[in-house]
Image (cartoon, rainbow, N blue to C red):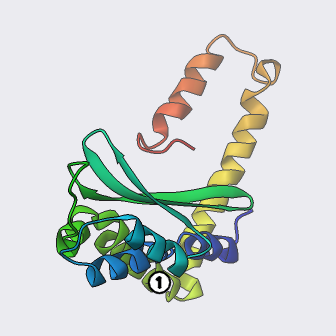
């Protein structure tokens, strides 16, 4: 069964890191108006040694991408810098505006998650209880519907479809 602690852990684990996007943006702000070159990328790599930061120029776009290999998986991201590959000059405010998922929206999502975690246990219990009831009901139906012989009549599949129709359309549980 699902516990309050499990729900809170899922939310905590989904709080998005600020790095290296914030450090990259800080360095870009310090370099505002300058041409994007290897020295600026090297400065980013020195400031964020756990990340590999590269300047990607392809498909008429320039991006700054980063990646890390922390167990058990690889993670990373990229910022759109400009819609051209050559003679790219840094406009830090434009870069901030072009990449809201890494700055403005990330901060909003994290704020919502933190506010949610401040709720009392009663709030979470009101979520956990119906989830556990739903799980128990699914388990009971599974025992019946997984064995046609325990539900012996010709309209078995129609009854099974009826149960499926009663699920909310946007739930794929």
- The percent position of residue 89, horizontal first and vertical second, equals 20, 65
Q: Quadrant of the C terminus?
A: top right
Residue drawn at (46%, 74%) of the image = 44
Which of the 4 image quarters holds residue 35? Answer: bottom left
Above/below status of 148 relative to 84: above
Between residues 20 and 147, which one lies in front from this camera angle? 20
Residue drawn at (70%, 71%) of the image = 3
Which of the 4 image quarters holds residue 7? Answer: bottom right
Above/below status of 71 relative to 3: above
Q: Would you name the residue on which mark 1 appears? A: 114
Which of the 4 image quarters holds residue 48? Answer: bottom right
Between residues 29 and 150, which one lies in front from this camera angle? 29
Residue drawn at (52%, 59%) of the image = 76
Looking at the image, residue 154 sits to the left or right of residue 37; the answer is right
Between residues 91 and 172, which one lies in front from this camera angle? 91
- The percent position of residue 81, horizontal first and vertical second, equals 27, 60
Alpha-carbon neighbours of circle 1 within 10 Å: few (<14), some, or many (≥20)?
some
Q: Quadrant of the N terminus?
A: bottom right
Can you see residue 120?
A: yes
Number of marks drawn: 1
- The percent position of residue 128, horizontal first and vertical second, equals 61, 69
* Residue at the far top in the pictured view: 154
Residue drawn at (18%, 71%) of the image = 91
Between residues 61 and 154, which one lies in front from this camera angle? 61
**SS at circle 1:** helix
- The percent position of residue 102, horizontal first and vertical second, equals 37, 68
Can you see residue 133?
A: no
């Amino acid at each position: 069964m699902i516990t309050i602690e499990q729900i809170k852990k899922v939310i905590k684990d989904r709080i998005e890191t600020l790095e290296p996007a914030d450090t990259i943006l800080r360095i870009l702000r310090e370099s505002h108006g300058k041409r994007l070159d290897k020295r600026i990328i090297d400065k980013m790599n020195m400031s964020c040694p756990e990340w590999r930061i590269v300047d990607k120029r392809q498909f008429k776009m320039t991006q700054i991408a980063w990646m890390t290999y922390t167990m058990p998986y690889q993670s990373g991201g990229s910022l759109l810098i400009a819609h051209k590959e050559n003679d790219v000059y840094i406009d830090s405010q434009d870069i901030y505006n072009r990449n809201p998922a890494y700055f403005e929206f990330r901060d909003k999502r994290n704020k919502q998650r933190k506010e949610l975690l401040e709720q009392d246990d009663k709030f979470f219990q009101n979520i956990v209880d119906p989830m556990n009831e739903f799980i128990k009901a699914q388990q009971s139906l599974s025992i019946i519907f997984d064995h046609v012989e325990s539900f012996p009549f010709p309209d078995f599949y129609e009854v099974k479809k009826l149960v499926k129709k009663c699920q909310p359309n946007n739930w794929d549980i």
